[in-house]
Amino acid sequence: MKYLLLQYALYFALATIGATYGLHRYWAHNRGSRKVWFEWVSLICALFIGLYKPLGWVAAHRLHHKHTDTELDPHSPKHKGFWKVILSIWTPDMPASVIRDLVKNPRIKFMQRYGKWFIIPVILISPLTVLFGFLGIGILNYFGHKDGKPVSKWYINILAPFEGNHKDHHE
Ligand SMILES: [Zn+2]
Ligand SMILES: [Zn+2]
């Protein structure tokens, strides 16, 4: 039990830096001033929650904002089934047009290229943070939308830190 709580606390920190403020705010929405150290830290934290291909997540998320709850939204629960939403962040083919500003970034390039080499060791070192990451992204993408609209749900925050206000985020 103590191990589980420690892993959860670790996951919460990794997901806050890697997913919420890293891939989501900083990389997908270009928030905050450019900082090389934060780029490394955020990408490494993202790796430890299983997001080893940053551009896949960023592209899916940008398309999600651009085409929210339409056929073109890669993870609209209304148009795709449960599993398609849950697995969407690993969809390999994303249009390059939505990530053009990031493909030349050396940190991104490194992770796109070599991230897959680290994922097996990461799973061996820290299986629970990877599992929580998988569930957290799935919960955000699936429960953050209902009946073709974004919604805010407090429980999203349990595994997707500070992302429960998803409706406000879209607005
Ligand atoms: Zn967003
Ligand atoms: Zn959304």
Image (tube, helix red, strand yellow):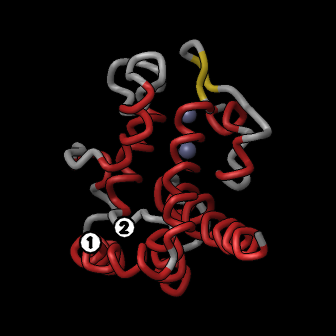
Q: Residue at x 39, y 32 (%)?
A: 83
Label 1: element kind: helix
Whole-percent x and y of residue 84?
Answer: 36, 32
Image position of 131 (left or right of 123): right
Q: Residues within 10 Å of mark 2 (few under 14, many from 20)?
A: many
Label 2: element kind: loop
Residue type pointed to by label 2: Tyr
Q: In the drawing, what numbered circle is on residue 116?
A: 1
Task: Read off the residue under disc 2.
Answer: 52
Q: Is residue 108 above or below residue 60?
A: below
- Please indicate, yes or no, whether residue 105 appears anywhere in the rendered image: no
State which quadrant residue 132 falls in. Answer: bottom right
In-front residue for pair 111/3: 3
Kindly report the distance in space between the C-alpha atoms of the residues bearing marks 2 and 1: 6 Å
Image position of 140 (left or right of 43): right
Q: Residue at x 47, y 26 (%)?
A: 68
Please tell me which of labels 2 and 1 falls first in the chain.
2
| Image quarter of the N terminus | bottom right
| Image quarter of the C terminus | top right
Q: Are marks 2 and 1 in contact (CB under 8 Å)?
A: yes
State which quadrant residue 101 falls in. Answer: bottom left
Q: Residue at x 33, y 53 (%)?
A: 56
In-front residue for pair 118/101: 118
Q: Is residue 95 above or below residue 121?
A: above
